[in-house]
Amino acid sequence: MASSGTADHGRPTRAAAGATPASGTRSAGGTTASGARSAVGIRAAAGVKDVAAAAGVSLGTVSNVLNRPEMVSPATRAKVEAAMESLGFVRNESARQLRAGSSRILAYLMLDAGNPFFTDVARGVEEAARAAGLSVFLCNSNEDAGREADYLDLLEQQRVQGVLITPVDPDSARLSNLPARGTPVVVVDRSIDNGEHCSVAVDDVFGGEIALSHLLELGHERIAFVGGPNNIGQVTDRRAGARRALEKAGRSGEELVDLVTGALTVAEGRGAGQRLAGLPAARRPTAAFCANDLLALGLLQQCVSLGLRVPDDLAIVGYDDIEFAAAAAVPLTSVRQPRQLLGRTAAELLLDESGNPDHEHQRVTFTPELVVRTSTRGN
Amino acid sequence: MASSGTADHGRPTRAAAGATPASGTRSAGGTTASGARSAVGIRAAAGVKDVAAAAGVSLGTVSNVLNRPEMVSPATRAKVEAAMESLGFVRNESARQLRAGSSRILAYLMLDAGNPFFTDVARGVEEAARAAGLSVFLCNSNEDAGREADYLDLLEQQRVQGVLITPVDPDSARLSNLPARGTPVVVVDRSIDNGEHCSVAVDDVFGGEIALSHLLELGHERIAFVGGPNNIGQVTDRRAGARRALEKAGRSGEELVDLVTGALTVAEGRGAGQRLAGLPAARRPTAAFCANDLLALGLLQQCVSLGLRVPDDLAIVGYDDIEFAAAAAVPLTSVRQPRQLLGRTAAELLLDESGNPDHEHQRVTFTPELVVRTSTRGN
DNA sequence: GCTTGTTTCTGAAAGGTTTCAAATGGATGG
DNA sequence: CCATCCATTTGAAACCTTTCAGAAACAAGC
């Protein structure tokens, strides 16, 4: 972007007035804090040992206060708690976990944190985890297999209770290795049957089918499928469903006009819109089914701004029914999935796996539904 | 929502055919995996000791391969690596961290993971962290002070390298305690000057001011401010800026019609829209400035569906300029902030704090800019 | 062949917590 | 007053790595 705003980063310029609106100007004011910092920082962190000494009890008792408060007398407990408070004791989770062997954390490795669909799933995960007294760390692979692999390694090393993941690459060895080594994995939004883990998914093929059937019923002949990259299962399944609908209608799946995108983002959707609007009207599809709502919103925005009327010149169906779909330039017809329920169910399966000795892996599949709005059916 | 789809959760019903579209039907297929699981699970996780034995070297050598590979001979290194591979060795991060004392993780505690503004900030954070070889865990307080506090405790116990936070409650003792106990904190999207930590923010008062000035220039007289709850600093600052604009125009800040919401979400925006549209036309504001884009989008959607024309009957200004703002029913005028830069800068300050011995706390402030679109200025 | 210097490897100690078998102390019952 | 029992508290061992001082192996120089 712009220059000065980003350029003077590390430098503690204060009130650097320069006006570069795009990235903003920055004014930085130093504080007197560094002195204070070192003064306080001297005191090393207090451990159970220090607390024990301060409270005049043994180490084991402090640990009991922490882990089985009911078995220590109220008087002692009070003493210990007071000592903790005054020393600012913070339990060292590494040590706890090392000794106790178990982590109270569960991770959700998302495909794209910028997609509201996944944050809604995350909400469901968190709800279920919280109910079970666990905390959730979110990680974002951002559709990048390398980052996904890195995070999986990290999480395994951290010995988290379990990993929920919407994978870029569901067949990676890294993923199927985890359970055998003791880290339960549940795959979210992808159906997997390799005997290694549970999965919770929505029937994407069916979703693609109902989306396209809808367009066919409306009489559309030339229909585009917008989505990519093709290594993402959701994309290929939804496309397959769309093809199936065509075939059921007695036409060839090949008739589907494929607009492959590089990612499932608004920006890519705009790009597809550009390409689509550029076609001569006679060859241009009259309807587009997008692999997700982000693409659909981008497509919609670009096409509208290039003068196409939606749905008259181009009908659009999205996928996910994210909250923004209904608020779009033209409210978007979309395939709805039970997002939070997806997350909640996945978390519950994970909890069952790590708690229940005779857990059996399951493949849960939900059925999506079509929500019709203006983008396919005028007002 | 619906009944059966959600009710038969834990039960491993397979192919439970029932059709409850709203929440979806589910069919679950058990696998043969539980047998396999126990068979493999027997083998306890291999540790450095096992690797050392298998490779015929000492414990310390294995550790050297892990941490200073350059100081072990190629031959031994190969032997050790082979042993690791065949034993499926996974380093125990708890033990590593306990002994080594340092974590390679940094956390961003977000105000609302469902708000694309914060996920964009997170993207910036991750970018900077990755460049420094660190990983990022995302946590979502969801505008809930209790959850925020829980996560802060958790992160402190985990001894993460540092915490980036967009706080619900910037003045909480929990927050200001962290740095003194050794966990650096950088506040994001809020300007703080308590000498405890750095902060990176955008001038929200100024943002509110330019938003309202814009509306005033367009000749609006009755203007509403939509936002809440009032314990969120961004809300009060933006409102204050709006008032200041009024006052600079020679009018009273009191003239601003306050529509307080319970959260900064699309749903709350719709609620505000309902209230606003319900007012008799003579008293209804002709313009609304919303504390963020989610509110604005909800407001917009609701008002349009209730028959108000935007911007003719009601002009709307949002805040954040999230990607969806431009794709809205009526493209939204909004106050843009340098989101990724915000995250990146914050992460860099954090890294400086934990790396540079004579780090000085800074308050960095960026300046927002107004992006004018149809929602305030017709076509 | 012996000394000196490098490079590589070793083994024990340390890090903060939890666990558990055993010790303590006070109360109860006879 | 003694034997028992129960509720608490104790102290040492264990969890798995990393670190570091020093041992070992080897080469070079004389």
Image (cartoon, coloured by chain):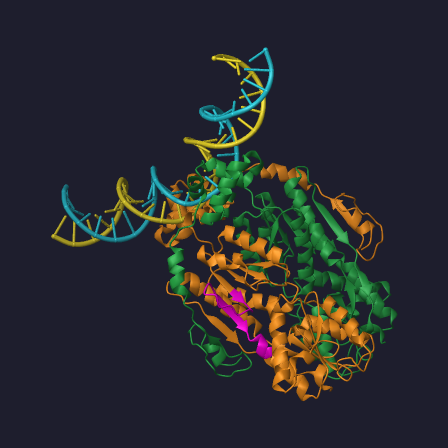
Chain colours: A orange, B green, C yellow, D cyan
The reply to whether residue A180 is visible in this rendering is yes
Residue toward you, B352 or A248: A248
Asked whether residue A189 is drawn in magenta, I would say: yes
Q: What is the count of numbered marks? A: 0
Camera-nearest residue between A115 and B68: B68
Q: Position of residue A88 (x, y in %)?
A: 52, 45
Q: Position of A185 compared to B111: left or right?
A: left
At which x and y percent is residue B32? 41, 67
Depth check: A360 or B22 in front? A360
Quadrant the C terminus of chain A occupies:
bottom right
Left or right: residue A95 versus residue B313 is left
Q: Residue at x 75, y 84 (%)?
A: B307
Stretch of the chain drawn in magenta:
A187-208
Residue B119 higher or lower than B134, as above or below: below
Q: Left or right of B351: which side holds A359?
A: left
Q: Position of residue B90 (x, y in %)?
A: 49, 49
x and y, in percent, of residue A320 in the image: 63, 74
Magenta span includes B218 = no
Give whichever of B145, A306 is nearer the camera. Answer: A306
- From the viewer's perspective, is A38 left or right of A223? left
When the figure is inspected, residue A52 is found, relative to residue A379, above or below; the finding is: above
Residue A305 lies in quadrant: bottom right
At 79% across and 66% down in the image, what residue appears?
B253
The residue that appears at 56% across and 43% down in the rendered structure is B102
